[in-house]
Image: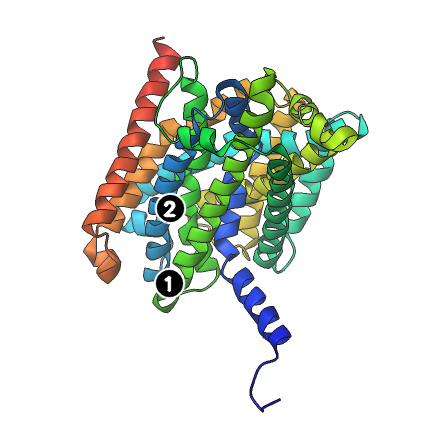
Amino acid sequence: MREGKNHPTTTSISSLKKWFNILGPGLITAALVFGPGSLTVTSKLGALYGFDLFWVIIMSIFFMIIFTGMAVRLGVNTKMSLLSVIKEKWGKVVSVIIGIAIFVIAASFQAGNTIGASLAFSEMFLTPTWPWVLAFVSLAIALLFFRSFYKILEKIMIIMVGMMLLSFLITLLLARPDFGAILSGLYPQIPKGSEMLSIALIASSFSIVGAFYQSYLVKEKGWGKSEIKKGKRESLAGILILGIISSFIMINAATILYPAGIPVNSATDMGLALKPLYGNFATTIFMVGLFCASFSSLIGNATIGGVLLADAFGFGHDLKLKAVRWFIALVMVFGAFIALKYGRLPLELIIFAQGITVTIAPIVGLALLLIANDKSIMGEFKNNLKQNIASALGLALLVFLAVFYIRQLFFA
């Protein structure tokens, strides 16, 4: 062997490591965006309407990529955090309002994440939910106070997302869906009665809060302008994985549940619907997927709410700061309190959480878009015409959903 020439095995390992290294924050974004609410809503839409709303996933992922890309460029281009930039541009009051708004969104989802993780084990072992709630929240809080919290968080997210992908991919391969029917789902339509669930699906997949937090994740990596391409790759990889997981679940539900007329009213229903494929292991396999989606979001979602609330009130955003970790723990405790009260994962709670998201999201999206167009802040990374057109359409969608949800809630 010539000196300096890499062995094929060494090259393969190096390529694999390189692939995993580009995932990082993008995978975390995918993991925290895709939680038990996403899993339940996507499954229910597939079970009730087949492939009719498959186009919603594609549209949502497109806008998620646009807004996440803006956050990445902002994160690597500024020395300050995004909320600090907002504070400097519009004042402390605006920064605090946005920080609280994001905290409210995160807190509204946290109960579902906690219930979902606990429900998976209580269903498998036929035990009450509350011991698992206390166990998993205690474990999550304990992880906060490890010295290398970000590295631990990153590894947990990668493992969880990998397990989710594997579980749903196996189901998809065994289900053998009709690809012609899948393509027909790309034609935009909204079946009667699906409006609120469709809003919940968009809020799940097009998470403006997840996109906003991407700017903090690249800062946690310590990246600057020279890493802009790496940040974009990570962002794109994570969002595409989010889209793939959501697509797998809807395709499975549309292929297995829809023809059989099986509604999705509980986690057990979703698991039992796969029994013809997995036999007695159907519920267990599904519960593994539910736990992965829930626990990864339990940690990631609490991190978003806690970090941004701490930053809004001037405590900083570095995950190494104890004050920041206590704010994250606050979100987890809030979720545990609601979870202990409900003890299950009602669809109404999920839709309510998604409703809060779409109501507040336009404020967050507008702030992100305005800063991305400020040349004094963004410099050469300022939005171009194509990015502005796409992001304006995404913002218009957020405003439309907020108005529609408010009308349905108070005037229908």
Residue sitting at x 46%, y 52%: 237
- The residue most toward the bottom is 3
> If you read the primary sequence from the N terminus, does the residue marked by circle 1 or circle 2 appear first?
2
Name the residue nearer the viewer: 10 or 403: 10
Asked if residue 6 shows in the view, the reply is yes
Residue sitting at x 48%, y 59%: 220
Work out whether 184 lies above or below 231. Answer: above
Name the residue that disc number 2 marks. Answer: 65
Q: Give percent across and percent down for residue 242.
A: 49, 42
Image quadrant where one finds the N terminus: bottom right
Work out whether 352 lies above or below 137. Answer: above
Q: Name the colour scheme.
A: rainbow
Question: In the shown orientation, is residue 353 left or right of residue 62?
Answer: right
Residue sitting at x 41%, y 28%: 184
Name the residue that disc number 1 marks. Answer: 229
Asked if residue 313 shows in the view, the reply is no
Report the amino acid beneath label 1. Lys
The residue carrying pointer 1 sits among few (fewer than 14), some (14 to 19) or many (20 or more) residues within 10 Å by Cα, namely few
